[in-house]
Image (tube, coloured by chain):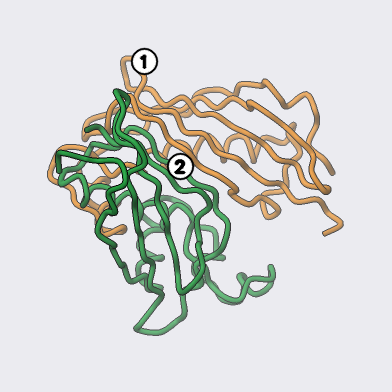
Amino acid sequence: MSGWTAGDALPEQTYTVTRADLVRYAGASGDLNPIHWSDRVATSVGLPGVIAHGMFTLALAARALDTWAGATGRVLELGCKFTKPVVVPDDDTGAEVTVRGTVKQVTDDGVHVALEVTCGDEKVLGAPRAVLRA
Amino acid sequence: MAVDASLSGRTFPPTPPYVVSRERIVEFAAATGSTYDGGAAPATFPIVVAFAAMTGLMEDPSVGISLHRVVHGEQRFTYTRPVVAGDELSATLTVDSLRQIGGADIIGTRSEIVDGDGRPVCTAFATLVHRGEDR
């Protein structure tokens, strides 16, 4: 995409996250923490159940950025706080994560995008933001 | 046990070179539903190397971190260039800051990720929250 303008609302992206996705991500990333695949361990540390890796959720935000940019490799900066867990039920439906973005400003550094990443009604990432190469 | 205050400013040894194969990128992209067109790896791919550096910190017995008390609080990447297949990446982690809040250690880390020629690829900033024993 070219012609980014401050104030642009980028098309909302919705992704489904299942237990199978988490297992796959655990293998691909090397993060084998059992809270991302074992209900027994997750509930023993006070979680409602198995939760997605925070980095998996951030990867979904990066996926939305690639979609909006129309190309890979455009991300110059990406970051967030991990504020709320994405609880992924052990069923075929999984959880739904929605990524929204707004262009905040376009400078010589690139296109500054404020993100909003939600699951249900809750924001799961804190202050997620990115800078893209224009 | 709180983490020792001398941790702040400490730099850990570089992680062993991680050879980025095409297959590893395909696997990572598939796991996150991302596109891989043979060029840039997904933006969060460098977490694989940053994670190794953070594990080095957390498993160092002189640091005093209990692994099961650590929560990933915050993550940020700045990129000099995207990761591509054939890269040999290594991460060097420095503890930038250490604060105690409500019985938890808030550990600010910075991992400089370089390629096989030592040229910068990306910097990964992570905040690790090490919860105290009483909670």
The correct choice, above or below, for A99 with respect to B66 in the image is below
The correct choice, above or below, for B135 with respect to B55 in the image is below
Q: Tell us which disc is closer to us: 2 or 1.
A: 2
Label 2 element class: strand
Q: Is residue A64 left or right of residue B103?
A: left
Determine which residue is flagged by label 2: A79
Q: Which residue does the image show at 56% across and 45% down from the upper left?
A: B74
Please name whichever residue, B54 or B23, is drawn nearer the observer in this view of the structure. Answer: B54
The circle drawn on residue A17 is none
Instruction: Identify the chain of the residue marked 2, using the numbered disc in the image.
Output: A
Q: Residue A57: which quarter of the image? A: bottom left
Q: Which residue does the image show at 13% across and 41% down from the upper left?
A: B38
* Quarter containing the C terminus of chain A: top left
Label 1 element class: loop
Q: Position of residue A60 (x, y in %)?
A: 34, 56
Instruction: Identify the chain of the residue marked 1, using the numbered disc in the image.
Output: B
Please name whichever residue, A9 or A89, is drawn nearer the observer in this view of the structure. Answer: A9
Q: Amino acid at mark 2?
A: Gly
Please name whichever residue, B60 or A131, is drawn nearer the observer in this view of the structure. Answer: A131
Chain letter, colour green in render? A
Please name whichever residue, B133 or A11, is drawn nearer the observer in this view of the structure. Answer: A11
Q: Position of residue A3 (x, y in %)?
A: 16, 39
Q: Colour of chain B?
A: orange
The correct choice, above or below, for B88 with respect to A52 in the image is above
Determine which residue is flagged by label 1: B118
Q: Amino acid at mark 1?
A: Gly
Q: Residue A111: which quarter of the image? A: top left
Q: Which residue does the image show at 58% across and 49% down from the upper left?
A: B72
* Quarter containing the N terminus of chain A: top left
Q: CA distance from mark 2 to mark 1?
A: 24 Å
Neighbor class of circle 1 (other Cα within 10 Å; few <14, some 14-19, many 20+) is: few
Q: Is residue B54 left or right of residue B129?
A: left
